[in-house]
Image (tube, rainbow, N blue to C red):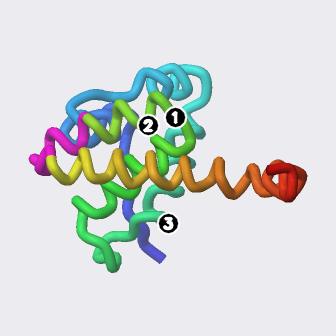
C-alpha cells in the first residue's frame, strides 16, 4: 500500500502561513516540544474538515470562529480572524457570526438560570 509521505514541519507551517497569514504561537511552541502534536492536529483537522466535504471553506471558517468565540479560545479566535481576512470573508458575515454567538451565549445563561427562575416563582 502506497501512502502520501508525511509533510515536514516546515511544509505544514508554510501551509498554515498561506491559509491564515501566520502560525499560531501555541502550535509553534507545541511543535518544539513534541512534533507529534502537530501531526495529530493535522489528522484531526482532516477528520473534521475533509477534502470535498459538505461545507465550503467560508462556512467552515465561520463555524470554527463561532465555536472558538463560544469556547473563549483566544488563539483560535485570532487564527480564524486571520483566516477570514485571508479568505476575504465579508465584514457583515463576520459580525453576524459574532452576534449569533452572543445571542447563543445569552440564551445559555437564561437556560442555565432555570433553577433560579423556578426558585423565584411565586415570589412576585
Tag 2: Cα neighbours inside 10 Å, few (<14), some, or many (≥20)? some
* Span colored in magenta: 82-91
Q: Is residue 54 in view?
A: yes
In the current view of this chain or complex, which residue is farthest to the right? 119
Q: Is residue 88 above or below residue 33?
A: below
Depth check, mark 2 against mark 3: the one in front is: 2
In the displayed structure image, the side of residue 7 where residue 45 appears, left or right: right
Q: Residue at x 38, y 47 (%)?
A: 65
Do callouts 3 and 1 mark residues in contact (Cβ within 8 Å)? no
Q: Secondary structure at mark 2?
A: helix
Depth check, mark 3 against mark 1: the one in front is: 1
Quickly name the residue at label 3. Answer: 47
Task: Kindly report the distance in space between the C-alpha atoms of the residues bearing marks 2 and 3.
Answer: 18 Å
In the displayed structure image, the side of residue 6 where residue 107 appears, left or right: right
Check residue 86 for magenta coloring.
yes
Q: Is residue 46 above or below residue 102?
A: below
Name which of mark 2 and mark 3 comes first in the sequence. 3
Q: Which mark is residue 94?
A: none
Task: Kindly report the distance in space between the C-alpha atoms of the residues bearing marks 1 and 2.
Answer: 5 Å
In the depicted view, which residue is nearer to us: 103 or 13? 103
In the current view of this chain or complex, which residue is farthest to the front? 124
Do callouts 1 and 2 mark residues in contact (Cβ within 8 Å)? yes
Q: Is residue 57 above or below residue 86?
A: below
In the displayed structure image, the side of residue 93 where residue 8 appears, left or right: right
Name which of mark 3 and mark 1 comes first in the sequence. 3
Q: Which mark is residue 73?
A: 1
Q: Which mark is residue 76?
A: 2
Amino acid at each position: 500500500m502506497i501512502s502520501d509521505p508525511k509533510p515536514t514541519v516546515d511544509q505544514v507551517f508554510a501551509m498554515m502561513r498561506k491559509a491564515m497569514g501566520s502560525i499560531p504561537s501555541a502550535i509553534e511552541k507545541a511543535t518544539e516540544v513534541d512534533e507529534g502534536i502537530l501531526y495529530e492536529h493535522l489528522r484531526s483537522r482532516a477528520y473534521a474538515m475533509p477534502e470535498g466535504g459538505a461545507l465550503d471553506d467560508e462556512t467552515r471558517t465561520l463555524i470554527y470562529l463561532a465555536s472558538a468565540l463560544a469556547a473563549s479560545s483566544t488563539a483560535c479566535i485570532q487564527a480564524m480572524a486571520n483566516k477570514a481576512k485571508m479568505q476575504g470573508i465579508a465584514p457583515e458575515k463576520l459580525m453576524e457570526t459574532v452576534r449569533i454567538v452572543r445571542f447563543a451565549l445569552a440564551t445559555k445563561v437564561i437556560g442555565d438560570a432555570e433553577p433560579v427562575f423556578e426558585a423565584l416563582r411565586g415570589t412576585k
